[in-house]
Amino acid sequence: MGELEETVLDAFRRGGLSRRAFLKFCAATASLLALPPAAATAMAETLARTPRPTVIYLSYQECTACLESMTRSFSPTIEHLIFNNISLAFNDTLQAAAGEAAEAARKEAMRQAWGKYILIVDGAVPMGAGGAYCVAAGQSAVDDLRHAAQGAAAIIAVGTCAAFGGIPYAAPNPTGAVPVSEVIRDRPVINVSGCPPIPEVMTGVVVYYLSFGMPALDHQGRPLAFYGNSIHDRCYRRPFYDEGRFAHTFDDEGARNGWCLYELGCKGPVTYNACATLKWNQGTSFPIQSGHGCLGCSEPDFWDKGGFYRPLSAATGHWPRGEVLGAAALGGVVVGAGMAALARSHQKTSAAKTAKEAGSPPPKEDPHER
Amino acid sequence: MSAETNLLDFARGPALEAALIILVFGIFWRLVGVLALPRTRDLSEPRVRHAWLGGVKTIFTRMWPRREFRPRILHWEAVSYIFHIGLAVVILGLVPHILLIRDITGLSWPGLPDGVITFAAGAALISLLALLAHRVTHPVLRQISNFDDYFSWLLVFTPLLTGLMAYYHLGGRYEDLLGLHMLSAELLLAWLPFSKLAHTVFFLFSRGVTGAVYSRRGARI
Ligand code: SF4
Ligand code: SF4
């Protein structure tokens, strides 16, 4: 427990970083979160008092790209943040220990910080076959998550798989994968979506939580500070979209001139993420800047929306257009002809009836009818 | 996951497919149904050699009112033109629309910049409102208007409005507005063959047939 009394600032210092570096880190994070400058001071003051928290990082059905992304965070790096400043008590990918020793370490860390730790989850949770598709140390992911969530102060679902089910959840979802929020329904889960999420966003969310508590979330449970705008809202190619200048292929004049990628399937208009502002690799670039449309990776079901290279306005279904619409036309012709034939025969019978009522012989075929 | 995203997915997926099937089926049904109806043969001596030419001519002459009617209706004719041209520019000029048409038919053409589209959409919207006001205030027009007229008006107005709102992110999240826009346009497509909106296709036939019949009888058309 003694360790928990150490504050975040103490841990920073112990890691060989100056108070100045700590303040710079707070200022950088505050600006990431688009907070006013005064918030950086408030953040620094709070973090200087906040006991160093315990972070338990659990991975289920995932590809480890979220962790890859996270460990490439800006300076002071996330490695510093999580190893020296936040106590990463358990992450089976990064830690040296394995097997029973690792499990024991995790149990101990959770026991010590029960009720106070930050639980980070990446990966979807398979519910099919009683959870048998993802089992570690004899425990299924779903049971493991339920148990770990009970002792967590906050739960952060990192990556689109944890936040919305992601790729394991994609049709036909053979393992019955679900997002974290479908397992933990009785409390808010902070969704940090993206495939993977931007490292600064992950860091920013953790630091915000430590400084100010629960961040404001959008209707998908994502922190508004990072997911408040669509890629399209902030895209530097937007003027070309407005002017109607589009790249038609990946190597035409439009592509070379950096015109809008809508026609090549860009999902920026319906994708909420911070790529267009924070960018990737220390602000170097982001997918659209390097010439590829947004895949919509931070949105639910991005994998099942008809295709990455289909324009947003096009149909998502992969049905044979010609055959289906041809059959509809043929059906229309048949029904139309049938109705007309019915009208003709109805006309004849009613003509015959009228003639009979009038006492004259029924007319023969109307010679004038075509 | 989210209802909002699903709205757009539904609009781009099954709803679009269903609307197109109903549209194509309905147009062929109505067209063949009407064309194959029994008609009495005209026994009079044809006054002209090629009556069908009169039909073709009528398609064009009916595009503008006859002199006698002009003082009374010319301004409404102009408003109606603004609406029709505006709508055509929006439908055929906006790149996302062209991409949808390309996806379904394989046909494609260059698009127009958004300023032109916005102007056309605004003009269409305002003229549509004016035409509705005219319809409800004009005593005769009001008498001959029925549910079809008002519902068809609504189904044309809604996609225009939601389209503009989506484009300018007004009154909601883009994906919700886009979903609504697409769904309302799909409703329009499905309703089209069975309503007065079928004139989109039928006007050629009705004008052509009327013109041919009258020109055969020697009437001035
Ligand atoms: S490239 Fe994508 S995000 Fe950028 S303006 Fe075009 S459609 Fe919008
Ligand atoms: S640009 Fe789109 S697909 Fe690419 S990382 Fe950002 S949100 Fe994901």
Image: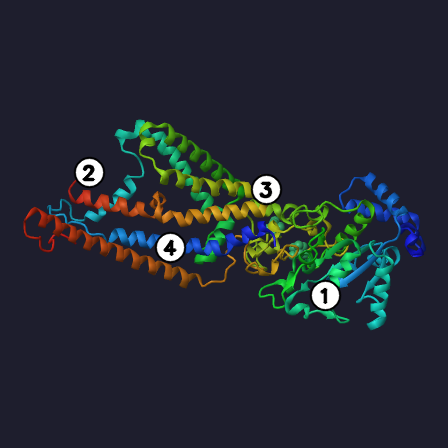
Is the residue marked 4 within 8 Å of ligand 1, measured from its CB? no
| Residue at mark 4 | B24
Instruction: Using the numbered discs, state the Cα–Cα distance from disc 1 to disc 3 in whole angstroms.
Output: 38 Å
Q: Label for residue A83?
A: none
Residue B177 location in percent, x, y?
Answer: 55, 45
Residue A259 shows in this picture: no
Task: State the residue at coordinates (82%, 63%).
Answer: A90
Task: State the residue at coordinates (56%, 53%).
Answer: B6
| Residue at mark 2 | B220
Q: Secondary structure at mark 3?
A: loop
Tell me if A253 is positioned left or right of A345 in this view: right
The quadrant in which the C terminus of chain A is found is bottom left
Q: Are marks 2 and 3 on the same chain?
A: yes
Task: State the residue at coordinates (86%, 71%).
Answer: A101
Type of the residue with mark 3 = Gly
Instruction: Using the numbered discs, state the Cα–Cα distance from disc 1 to disc 2 in whole angstroms.
Output: 84 Å
Q: Label for residue A141?
A: 1
* Structural crowding at the residue carrying mark 3, measured as other residues with C-alpha within 10 Å and reported as few (<14), some (14–19) or many (≥20): few
Q: Of circles 1 and 4, which is in front?
A: 1
Subunit of mark 3? B
Between discs 3 and 4, the one toward the N terminus = 4
Instruction: Using the numbered discs, state the Cα–Cα distance from disc 2 to disc 3 in whole angstroms.
Output: 55 Å
Q: Of circles 1 and 3, which is in front?
A: 1
Subunit of mark 1? A
Reply above or below: B77 against A106.
above
Instruction: Using the numbered discs, state the Cα–Cα distance from disc 1 to disc 4 in whole angstroms.
Output: 50 Å
| Residue at mark 3 | B172
